[in-house]
Amino acid sequence: MKKSFIAMAVVVMALVFGGCAKVPQVELDATNAAIEKAKVAEANVYLQPAFTAIMDSLNVINAEIEANKGKLFKNFNDVKVKLAALEVQANELVVSTDAKKESIKQEVNAVLAELQTLATENAALVENAPKGKEGKAAIEAIKGELIVIDGATAEVTQLLQAGKLLAAQSKAKATYDKALSINQELKAVVEKYNTKRK
């Protein structure tokens, strides 16, 4: 009788203490806040795979919390550890996102500088290009393309200033490729013309 009473007392105490384990709301809120900061920093745009991995981990933790709620003996210690680690990852993601954005800005600014150099060189090449009947129509077409490139370059600058870095990066690359292609075309025409004159 005494043994069964002690056993019953142990079970009751276990139920009281085990059943009282609460959802780690403070840790959950801190992790969610860190993830929200990462989202505000646009980690979901610039470091999308890493952000998705964090969201997947949070979903797994939330499922673990829900599963634990239904248990007789609740234990959220493991969940707390996982939440703390996820909060650190989310905070690190903010820093990584800022670094990625800065890297893109520097890349786009470098391309803009190269576009400026190409624009100057292309203008000089157009002046030195042959002005004959055949050459005149081709040069006029190239001048039109150079105007389009100037407009695209201005658009890259606007996108950069508006913080649309990925769009600026993509537009800058396409514009540079086009400007370089025209540059090579003009050089070939001028070289061919100069060779014939010799």
Image: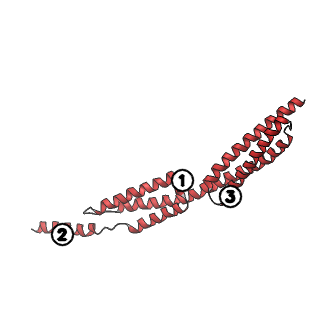
Name the residue: 22% across, 69% down: 13
In the image, 71 versus 56, the foreground residue is: 56
Q: Which residue is mark 3?
A: 158
Q: Which residue is mark 2?
A: 9
Name the residue: 86% across, 36% down: 132
**What amino acid does circle 2 point to?**
Ala
Give the structural element (helix, strand or loop) at label 3: helix
Residue 137 x %, y %: 80, 39
The quarter of the rendered structure image containing the N terminus is bottom left
Q: Which residue is mark 1?
A: 47
Question: Which is closer to the viewer, label 3 or label 2?
Answer: 3
First in sequence: mark 2 vs mark 1: 2
First in sequence: mark 1 vs mark 3: 1
Tell me the crowding category of disc 2: few under 14, some 14 to 19, or many 20 or more residues within 10 angstroms, Cα based. few
Q: Which mark is residue 27?
A: none
In the image, 150 versus 33, the foreground residue is: 150
Tell me the crowding category of disc 3: few under 14, some 14 to 19, or many 20 or more residues within 10 angstroms, Cα based. few
Question: Which is closer to the viewer, label 2 or label 1?
Answer: 1
Apparent side of residue 192 relative to residue 7 in the rendered image (left or right): right
Res. 198 image quadrant: top right
Query: Vertically, is 163 above or below 13?
Result: above
